């Protein structure tokens, strides 16, 4: 899955696989999280929220704790 770099204090890049309804979120601390069953409309609204500098608020309101997630990569300071 390809991710798009975003301008955000919280996120580095966001990607979405519409066939699998998976969204991958790379956070500023280096963690990469995978969210399951995320509809394309939620991903598109999330990406549009960047225009209003509201990505973190959108994420907290509409994605976090709403979709099952798993950590793909730990943060950059985690021991190897």
Image (spheres, rainbow, N blue to C red):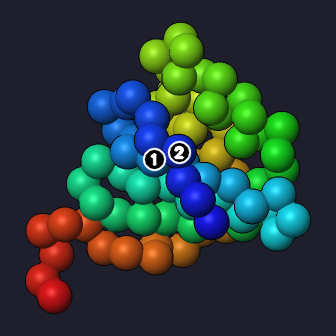
Residue 18 as seen in the image, left or right of residue 11: right
Q: Secondary structure at mark 2?
A: strand
Which mark, residue 4? Answer: 2
The picture places residue 76, in percent across and down from the top left corner, at 19, 66
Residue 80 as seen in the image, left or right of residue 74: left
Residue at 58% across / 59% down in the picture? 2
Residue at 60% across / 22% down in the picture? 49
Work out whether 21 lies above or below 46: below
Residue at 54% across / 74% down in the picture? 70
Q: Residue furthest bottom?
A: 80
Q: Measure the C-alpha gap from mark 2 to mark 1.
A: 5 Å
The picture places residue 57, in percent across and down from the top left corner, at 51, 27
Q: Which residue is labeled 1 in the image?
A: 13
Q: Secondary structure at mark 1?
A: strand
- Mark 2 neighbour class, 10 Å CA radius: few under 14, some 14 to 19, many 20 or more: some
The picture places residue 63, in percent across and down from the top left corner, at 64, 46
Give the mark nearest the N terminus, 2 or 1.
2
Residue 11 as seen in the image, left or right of residue 41: left
Which mark, residue 38? Answer: none
Instruction: Classify the position of the N terminus by image quarter.
Output: bottom right
Instruction: Classify the position of the C terminus by image quarter.
Output: bottom left
Q: Is residue 59 visible?
A: yes
């Amino acid at each position: 899955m390809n991710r798009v770099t975003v301008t955000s204090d919280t996120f580095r890049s966001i990607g979405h696989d519409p066939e699998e309804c998976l969204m991958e979120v790379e956070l500023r601390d280096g963690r990469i999280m995978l969210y399951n069953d995320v509809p394309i409309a939620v991903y598109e609204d999330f990406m549009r929220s960047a225009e209003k500098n509201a990505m973190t608020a959108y994420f907290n309101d509409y994605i976090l704790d709403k979709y099952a997630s798993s950590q793909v990569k730990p943060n950059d300071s985690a021991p190897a």
